[in-house]
Image (spheres, rainbow, N blue to C red):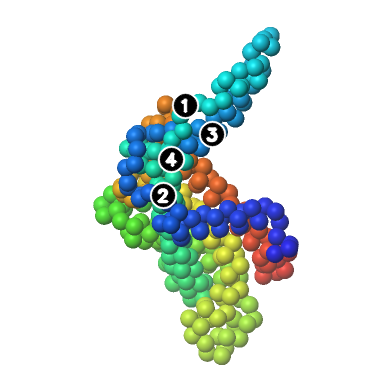
Amino acid sequence: MKNIPISAMIGLLFTALYFLMAIFAPLLAPYGVGEVVGDVWEISALSYYLSPVSYFFSEVWYFISTWPWNWAHFPLQHFAENTFIGTPGDYWLGTDNIGRDLLSRMIYGGRTTIFIATAATILSFTTGSILGFFAAVSGGWVDQVMSRLVDLVMSIPTLIFALVVLSVMPVTVPVLIVVMGLLDSTRVYRLARAVAVDIEVMDYVEAARLRGEKTAWIIFREILPNALSPLVAEMGLRFIFMVLFVSTLSFLGLGVQPPEADWGGIVKENKEGIVYGIPAALLPAIAIATLAISVNLVADWVLNRTTSLKGGRG
């Protein structure tokens, strides 16, 4: 742990916070996920208490941009009498477009988003890596047929493919996980096959063949342990892709269905408020961005720690 860079430590901290929030969401959320508790788009208590800071910087910017400067309008002259803007609300992040507590929606939405992304990532890597290893070990026409089928699926944009499939199927959480996992498994298949092709020609694999070991034994005992490092590093990147994928589907109306919450759905529900200066739609976007950056920082660190077949990166 002493050798972990500060960027990786920050990434681990934020990633752990998001996952703990997802696990303990019912204990952390002050209200139910669909409980209406107030008026539409009530001002948040956080915005109220931060309004002096916002007011001061807006006044500083206005003062700087107006030349010649009028020192009678220097921000500090009027800061005391314009300390707070509006009245404090009862909800830390305010309410959404129908009066539900936004903090509770964000917590439950984070649990849903992270759960779907994690489950889809596990399915993607389980399916893609096993098929990729099997194709590399089998070789010949089996490898060619499987690789060409994967190329065919990858030639269709993933989002369009998912929208077509989900438009004719019931949109439930299990269906979302299966569709997202199987579509993304093609990317994992290409990576797993590329790594396994290099490992498959090693002497210890040839020795296992000469001993008469079965294909499954070679895959799970010889290839998988040596291919685990690049797959683990890639898993973080694919997890972020899944978070963005499910959020995009929800924003387009074919993801998590109301009254359940996820971050993409919260953006969709509150996007009209941006015109009126309501930040409700920006909060889940910030959450997605911070989670993506955090996991990428951890994934970069893991990638730098992994070693390749010919000596690695240190």
Q: Residue at x 59, y 61 (%)?
A: 233
Q: Residue at x 28, y 49 (%)?
A: 167
Q: Which mark is residue 91?
A: 4
Who comes first in sequence, dot 4 or dot 3? Answer: 3
Cα distance in 3D space between marks 4 and 3 = 12 Å
Callout 2 touching callout 4 (CB < 8 Å): no
Residue under numbered circle 3: 49
Residue under numbered circle 2: 30
Q: Amino acid at mark 4?
A: Tyr
Query: In the displayed image of the protein, which residue is found farthest to the front?
Result: 81
Percent x, y of residue 107: 44, 50
Callout 4 touching callout 3 (CB < 8 Å): no
Task: Please tell me whether mark 1 sits on a helix, a strand or a loop.
Answer: loop
Percent x, y of residue 217: 51, 83
Residue under numbered circle 1: 86
Cα distance in 3D space between marks 1 and 4 = 14 Å
Who comes first in sequence, dot 1 or dot 4? Answer: 1
**What is the crowding at mark 3: few (fewer than 14 residues within 10 Å), some, or many (at least 20)?**
some
**What is the crowding at mark 4: few (fewer than 14 residues within 10 Å), some, or many (at least 20)?**
many
Q: Looking at the image, can residue 84 be seen?
A: yes
Nearer-the-camera pick, 105 or 248? 105
Cα distance in 3D space between marks 2 and 3 = 20 Å
Task: Please tell me whether mark 4 sits on a helix, a strand or a loop.
Answer: loop
The quadrant of the rendering that contains the C terminus is bottom right
Q: Amino acid at mark 3?
A: Tyr
Percent x, y of residue 53: 60, 30
Q: Looking at the image, can residue 160 be seen?
A: no
